[in-house]
Image (tube, grey):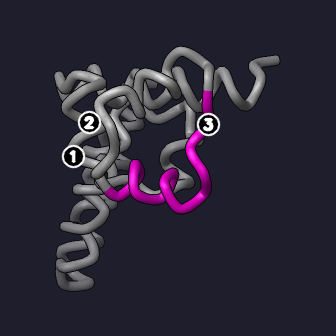
Amino acid sequence: MVKYEDFVKNRITELRMKEDISEYTLSKRLGHSKGYIYNISSGRALPPLKEFFEICRYFKISPKEFFDTEMDDPQMVAEAMDGFKQLSEKDQQTILDLINSLKEKDK
């Protein structure tokens, strides 16, 4: 079983690498000193809850998506959900039908 501390630091690193952003740049964009994310990634510190929410907000994901290890690209899923919510009910049903059709095709 992966420890919480290891999961958090690894997940932040994973998200950061997908964005192709350095520890330094992420630290600065979050309003912290240049070593802030390095300290998290190295296991020296964990982000306080408020900062954890800021990290999620930066990556445009929810805390639930942060902890969902089955989701390869939580940012893409969050973007898709935002778009889905803006569609009419008829268009939402069309998208659901397409998803179900694709799932059946993969079986």
Q: Is residue 29 above or below residue 70?
A: below
Residue 63 is inside the magenta segment: no
Amino acid bearing label 1: Arg
**Circle 1 crowding by C-alpha within 10 Å: few under 14, some 14–19, many from 20:** few
Locate residue 36: give its quadrant. Answer: top left
**Circle 2 crowding by C-alpha within 10 Å: few under 14, some 14–19, many from 20:** many
Q: Secondary structure at mark 3?
A: loop
C-alpha gap between disc 3 and disc 1? 18 Å
Residue identifier under label 3: 46
C-alpha gap between disc 1 and disc 2? 5 Å
Residue identifier under label 1: 29
In the picture, measured across the screen, residue 53 lies left or right of residue 90, that is right
Q: Are marks 1 and 2 in contact (CB under 8 Å)?
A: yes
**Circle 3 crowding by C-alpha within 10 Å: few under 14, some 14–19, many from 20:** some
Amino acid bearing label 2: Leu
Mark identifier at residue 26: 2
User: In this picture, which residue range is highlighted in magenta?
Assistant: 45-57
Q: Which residue is most to the front?
A: 33
